[in-house]
Amino acid sequence: MAKTADQPSWIKEFRKAVKASTPKGWLVMQGKKETTRVQIRKSGKKIGDITIPYKWEEKFWPNALQRIRAAAKAYEESGQKLDVRTCFNIAQKHTSESEIDWEKSIEAYREFKKDRVKDSTWRSKYHPVFKNVINATRKSSKAPLNGEELCKVALKQWQQGTPIRRHMRLALFGFLRFCVQEQQFESTWLPPDVTDKDLVTTKKKIGYPLTDSQILQLLNSFPIDKIGNKWRFAFQCMAVYGLRPEDLRTIHTRNGGQEIWTNFEKSKGGKKGEKTEARRLYPLLVHDIDGPINWHLKEQLAICEKEGLNLLPPLGKEGNAGDACRTYLSRRKVWEAIRKEVLIEEQKLTAYSFRHRYAYYGHNRPKADGSYRAPKQIADAMGHSLDTHLLIYSRFQTKDLATAFDETSLLVKGTF
């Protein structure tokens, strides 16, 4: 232990304050891992040795003192008969539950962030975790008593290492720091340190490309009614033209119905503000046992444009088309059956699996003359750069790999 003369002035002030507001024999000192430790002696005998959740730092000692005073008060009110650890548990409950208006603090944080966070971003990357905060802190015996406990409960629904959990963690940690620094919350509400478990994993599940037979089976399960037909048309377009869900909003025909285009603009992820351009769509037809199926999608769209009709289902607000597609698909038993098959293969089935199908067949289904399409052609048709295409779909480019090795049993003589 450092000599008194070498100690910072705040430690002297802290110990002086503890001595003045607690019974004789209450001592405060630095614990393991820079925590705050309280030792209690009575008649020369140690009756308690408690570590409280405050770092041994100047900015935390006023809150630590408040906790110690509350514990000492409980101890005195019991006639010094209560166990010291019980007194500190009472103090923790008392100080943690003292009139915190979480909803009001969240509103204050929204106001604090108003010039830096758009409403759409707030709804998608802040509101979900704050809703969990409200639910978790409702008065009950299981309500979190500090920042670490609150973070554990509020983030529970998101898997460790995923980007969405990272977004929610950043929002929640920033909010709790704001509460302590600007709303005068006790320092115990500060978030925990970030650990390796919180890092976003670079290993992602491979996006699954639906097969043509799976697509036909799925589409045949859709109801034959107005909404069912609209969703059928939407997913037919996604499969045949390799569309993203958001591409559906802007598909239209040009040149007298001879071409089909999408005007959807997507960030390229490089230079700030750089977006993809409108592109013409090129079909890769779905095949059944008899060959390619022509659903006449372009012609259907052209006719409906002339008649002022809408062929597409409701896709929600801008940016939510993927959610709308996912919700509709999740209600189909066939989709759920395919999803279970895909999980066994450690791949991921999403609304983008229609688009992945387009990339797969683009690379692996030869043209009429027997040749294959260049990767740049497929990238252009799908509306992204060649670099992005190679990064995402490089696994589809190697053809007939099994025949290049001793995969075929006919090539291997038996050794029986």
Image (cartoon, rainbow, N blue to C red):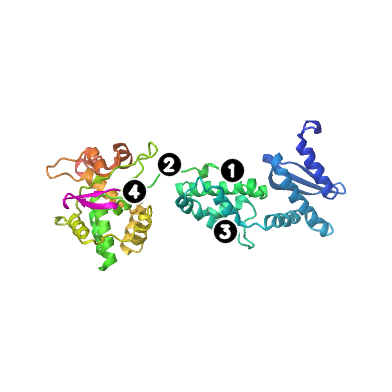
4 or 1: tag closer to the N-terminus: 1
Q: How many marks?
A: 4
Residue found 80% across the figure and 44% down from its top: 17
* Badge 3 amino acid: Ile
Real-space Cα distance between discs 4 and 1?
A: 33 Å
The magenta-colored residue range is 250-263
What x and y, as percent, mark residue 196?
A: 52, 41
In what element is the residue under mark 1?
A: loop
Residue found 84% across the figure and 59% down from its top: 79
**Residue 363 lies in what quarter of the image?**
top left
What x and y, as percent, mark residue 219?
A: 25, 61
Real-space Cα distance between discs 1 and 3?
A: 22 Å
Residue 359 among magenta residues? no
The reply to whether the C-beta atoms of the residues labelled 4 and 3 are less than 8 Å apart is no
What x and y, as percent, mark residue 183?
A: 64, 50
Real-space Cα distance between discs 4 and 3?
A: 35 Å
In what element is the residue under mark 3?
A: helix
The reply to whether the C-beta atoms of the residues labelled 4 and 1 are less than 8 Å apart is no
Q: Quadrant of the N terminus?
A: top right
Real-space Cα distance between discs 1 and 2?
A: 21 Å
Q: Which residue is the site of mark 2?
A: 202
Real-space Cα distance between discs 4 and 2?
A: 14 Å
Residue found 81% across the figure and 31% down from its top: 5
Q: Which residue is the site of mark 4?
A: 207
Real-space Cα distance between discs 2 and 3?
A: 32 Å
Residue 134 is tagged as: 3
Q: Nearer the viewer, mark 2 or mark 3?
A: 3
Q: Which residue is the site of mark 1?
A: 193
Vertical placement of residue 409 versus 288, above or below: above
